[in-house]
Amino acid sequence: MRFLSLASQHRVVIILGLTLIISALVVPGYFSASTLGLGLDRAATIGLIAIGLTVLLIAGQIDLSGGAVFALAGIISVILQREIGILPAAIVGILVGTVAGAINGALVVGLKVNSLVLTLATMLIFRSLAHWITNSQPVSGTDIMLSLALAKTYLDIFTIRSALFIVLIVLLHVWLTRTIPGRNVFAVGSNPAAAKESGIASDRIVFFGFVFAGTLAGLAGVLQSLVTNTGSPVFGSELTVAVIAAVVVGGTRLEGGRGSALGTLGGVLTIGSLTIAMEFQSVPAYVQQVVSGLILILLVVLDRAVTTKGRASGTRPALISDNPITQGGTT
Amino acid sequence: MSDAAMEISVNPDRFTRGSKLVDALSKAGLAFAILAVVLYGSVVSPAFFTSGNLLNVLTSMSIVGIVVVGMTFVLVVGGLADLSVPATIACGAILSLGLQPMIGPLPAFVLAVGLAGLIGLLNGVLVGYVGINPIIATLGIGTIGLGIVQAAVGGVIVYGSNPASAEFAKGRLFGIPVVVLIFLVIALIGHFVLSRSFWGRWTLATGGNYSAAEASAVPVQAVKAGAFVITALTAGISGGLLGLTLQSARPLIGAGYEFSAITAVVVGGVSIIGGFGSVPRAIAGLIFVQLLTNVMVLDGVRTPIQGFVLGILIVGAVGMDAALRKRGVA
């Protein structure tokens, strides 16, 4: 059991390593800079949404509406280009994500309902809005050259999108491990009642967690729409499972109170390299879905097995051993 | 986002509190709402109150309704929701058409429903025995199941090859469409099992107070798992009938049915956190939602707005459930 729990703590490294080795074996030239850059760029979309979801999961909540917000924000940012110009439209798009997150947060905190069920409903609402606005047709932007500029790679590896993702995840790591609000998120997630007793404004943290997650889903959607010069109401529908899988691979627990930004980075890179490897081998989309579903289920079961054992023997880890610093150090 | 069962254990008295008020409100409220929709529909659209239209509503309602019966068990047992319904419907539809040339229509149908049940069994084991969050488990298993079904037929549309079975599924018995009759039979069985049998009492007890049920020697894990098997079986039947009626099945044939079913059940006043609800309630919710959708279609409201309204209805119903029962589900 000790081995299993150790393996589950270091699993990001193990899984990422295995993925890279297998990918390198089946895809010739996998480790060339351009392939890696492509993988990183692809991973950045999942990654930006995963950043927001990491914070929410640590706080003990979840947001299933990310994929729908992703589509909606992208559509708004493309449609408004003609009226108000590209940059303002992009900003409005991101703000749409913020508002969507605020709606989720206000409803979860205000109605005191399970965030899984609530964001399931708002996912339906945001997705319907996306179809409504676009008449279920894809919309295209005004400036094709912009998408070329955004897709340009720097230092052979980074696109603007992937660089932004890396910067944000490092900032998140610092915020979660070195600041008081960051630590409070862990407290709220591991024991909401105790957190409240210690004077932490749980509701406010949960609310802003949703706002943060919505904003990042919006940002990811706007970037995707700018890079492809398209906004489509079906964008992001397959993202939900992939994003949750990425975060869970990174060791963040669905039960709340546990997780790390660097773990999520590892998880996102794993999903990204898997996707690229499968695309290079022209594996059909539905098989890719089976793979991400399998990863998700297997890891959640593993998590469950490890936690249940810990609880049964009375060694439920105290908050201090959930310390993100030690978690971060191991990943 | 702790397990629903854990939440319930800290609220031992939740089963009785306020339930009379909720009862009266939701029963009268729903009847009033259905009546209002019927009145509005008859006034706004001359096509609404015709036997042809109502028969259409009844037929499409029956396909969703079969799933609603199963989904009621999932909600009552405290299993939140089953998101693998699109996969189990696709499994039922694709296999019952795709296997026809090989083993004949009836064995194909039975096998398709059985395999859908297998998906449900996987969900049930993960949720009931391993203790995974139901939404995550069914989301993951649904993704996997749908992928495998697509891979099995190469990701293409499957067509029916047996006209006799199509005739049967589209036909009528005593002037009532066969699909509607099947729905009524399943609803009656579901209602009987939930309200009159030991399994139903176990289901209500498990959803109402997991620890107390466990202490009273109710096989809680099996009951929880069973709810997901029941939903998968009903979704498989529904998918099979859908495939036979349409004589074609694409992989995404079941998309959206999970939301229609969940909406109907929660609008019917079945508690999202379990322990309370019945099949007739869920069907009343279904009638309301289906009539509302029908009126919107006749009114020329575009499809996306219907999804929007469904979403709002879920939020409203769930919010009302939490408020009326004065207990939070964090």
Image (cartoon, coloured by chain):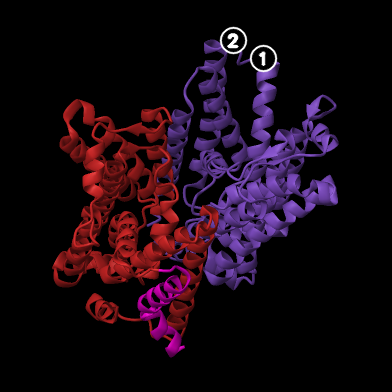
Question: Which quarter of the image is occupied by the N terminus of chain B?
Answer: bottom left
* A217 relative position to B162: left or right: left
Residue A185 appears at what percent x and percent y?
24, 65
Q: Amino acid at mark 1?
A: Thr
Contact check, label 1 and label 2, Cβ < 8 Å:
yes
Taking the spot 27% from the left edge, 56% from the top edge, the residue there is A206
Q: Which residue is mark 2?
A: B46
Q: Is residue A4 magenta?
A: yes
Q: Amino acid at mark 2?
A: Pro
Chain drawn in red: A
Q: Secondary structure at mark 1?
A: loop
In the rendered image, the residue lying farthest to the bottom is: A2
User: B323 or A232, which lies in front?
Assistant: A232
Chain drawn in purple: B
- Res B73 seen here: no
- Res B16 seen here: yes
Taking the spot 29% from the left edge, 61% from the top edge, the residue there is A37
Residue A26 appears at what percent x and percent y?
48, 70
Q: Which residue is mark 1?
A: B50
Query: Looking at the image, is B276 positioned above or below residue A230?
Result: below
Residue B105 appears at what percent x and percent y?
83, 45
Chain to which mark 1 belongs: B
Q: Main secondary structure of the magenta part?
A: helix
Query: Looking at the image, is A217 positioned above or below residue A275?
Result: above
Residue A256 appears at what percent x and percent y?
35, 67
Q: Which residues are magenta?
A: A1-28
Chain to which mark 2 belongs: B
